[in-house]
C-alpha cells in the first residue's frame, strides 16, 4: 500500500509544493485547508499529473471541534497516517509588542501554536497505536532568533521548536519520529499575508536576492521523511545562500 501523508495548509506555498512532490513519489494524500476551491483545484492537478489518491478536508485548524470532527470522519484505512506535516502557519503584521494589534496576535497564536496542537492531539494517538509514524512541524528561522517588529510571530515559532522537542522525547517509546524544519526567507504568500495584501511591500522583501522557494522546502521534507527507520532528522535549519541570519541579507546592488 502507498504511504499516507496529511498536509495542513495545502492550498498554497510550501503546502502545495509538498503535495505535488509527495504525489509524484507515490504518497496518498489527505489535504487540508480553509479554501475549498483551491483544495479541489489541487486535487484535480495531482490526479491528472500523478494519478494520486487524495482526500480533501476543508476546515480551519484554529477550530478544535472542526479539527476533531473532520479527522474523525476519515474512513478507517485513511486514519493509518504515516506522515503528518503541520505546515499551516502565518505571520500577520509587523509592529512592536506595545503597538501590536491583538487580532494579529490571536491569528498567529491560534494558527501557529494551537492549530499544530489540535492536529497533533488527534493524529498522534493513531500513530502510537500502530507504533509507527512521522510528524514534521514547520517552524521558521524566527523559531531560532528573535527580531524587532516580529516578537509575537517569533514567539509562536519558538513555541513550535519547544513543543516539537518535547514530542520527540514523549514518542520515543512508540517509534514515532518527530522532526522540525525551520526555513528562512521563502518566496511564497508569506509576506503578502504579513503585510495584509500589500503586494508591493511584499515584493521588496525578496528584492536583490534569490530566496528559497516552496519547492526547496518540499524537497527537504521529502528527504526527512524518507530516511531509514533508524534515522530521525530532529531539527533542520535551511536558508537562502544570501541570508545569514534573520536580519543579515546580502542584496545584489544591481538588482535593487
Image: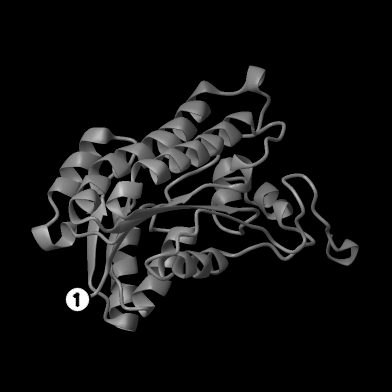
Percent coordinates x, y for residue 101 in the rendering: 56, 23
Residue furthest out toward the top = 98
Percent coordinates x, y for residue 107 in the rendering: 45, 32
Residue depicted at 86% across the width and 63% down the height: 252
Left or right of residue 214: residue 207: right
Residue depicted at 77% across the width and 61% down the height: 242
Residue 24 lies, with reference to residue 234, above or below; the image says below
**In the rendered view of the protein, which quadrant contains the C terminus?**
bottom right
**In the rendered view of the protein, which quadrant contains the N terminus?**
bottom left
| Within-10-Å neighbours for mark 1: few <14, some 14–19, many 20+ | few
Q: Quadrant of residue 38?
A: bottom left
Residue furthest out toward the right = 253
Residue 100 lies, with reference to residue 223, above or below; the image says above
Percent coordinates x, y for residue 76 in the rendering: 10, 58
64, 207: nearer the viewer: 64
124, 70: nearer the viewer: 124
Residue depicted at 56% across the width and 36% down the height: 158
Q: Secondary structure at mark 1?
A: loop
Residue 25 lies, with reference to residue 9, above or below; the image says below
- Residue 185 appears in the figure: yes
Residue depicted at 14% across the width and 54% down the height: 74
Percent coordinates x, y for residue 95 in the rendering: 66, 28
- Residue 92 appears in the figure: no
Q: How is the image coloured?
A: one colour
Q: Quadrant of residue 10?
A: bottom left
Q: Quadrant of residue 144?
A: top right
Q: How many marks?
A: 1
Residue 102 lies, with reference to residue 164, above or below; the image says above
Disc 1 target residue: 1
Amino acid at each position: 500500500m502507498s504511504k499516507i501523508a496529511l498536509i495542513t495548509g495545502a492550498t498554497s506555498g510550501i503546502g502545495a509544493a509538498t503535495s505535488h512532490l509527495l504525489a509524484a513519489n507515490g504518497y496518498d494524500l489527505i489535504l487540508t485547508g480553509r479554501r475549498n476551491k483551491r483544495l479541489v483545484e489541487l486535487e484535480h492537478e495531482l490526479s491528472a499529473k500523478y494519478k494520486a489518491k487524495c482526500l480533501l478536508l476543508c476546515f480551519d485548524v484554529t477550530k478544535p471541534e472542526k479539527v476533531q470532527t473532520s479527522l474523525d470522519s476519515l474512513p478507517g484505512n485513511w486514519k493509518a497516517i504515516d506522515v503528518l506535516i503541520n505546515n499551516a502557519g502565518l505571520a500577520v503584521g509587523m509592529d512592536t509588542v506595545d503597538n501590536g494589534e491583538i487580532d494579529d496576535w490571536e491569528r498567529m497564536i491560534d494558527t501557529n501554536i494551537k492549530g499544530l496542537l489540535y492536529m497533533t492531539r488527534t493524529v498522534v494517538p493513531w500513530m502510537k497505536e500502530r507504533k509507527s509514524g512521522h510528524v514534521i512541524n514547520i517552524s521558521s528561522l524566527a523559531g531560532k532568533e528573535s527580531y524587532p517588529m516580529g516578537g509575537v510571530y517569533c514567539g509562536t515559532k519558538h513555541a513550535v521548536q519547544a513543543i516539537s522537542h518535547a514530542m520527540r522525547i514523549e514518542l520515543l517509546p512508540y517509534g514515532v519520529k518527530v522532526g522540525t524544519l525551520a526555513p528562512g526567507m521563502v518566496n511564497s504568500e508569506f509576506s503578502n499575508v504579513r503585510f495584509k495584501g500589500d503586494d508591493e511591500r511584499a515584493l521588496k522583501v525578496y528584492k536583490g536576492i534569490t530566496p528559497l522557494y516552496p519547492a526547496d522546502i518540499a524537497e527537504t521534507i521529502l528527504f526527512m521523511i524518507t530516511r531509514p527507520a533508524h534515522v530521525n532528522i530532529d531539527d533542520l535549519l535551511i536558508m537562502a545562500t544570501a541570508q545569514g541570519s534573520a536580519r543579515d541579507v546580502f542584496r545584489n546592488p544591481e538588482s535593487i
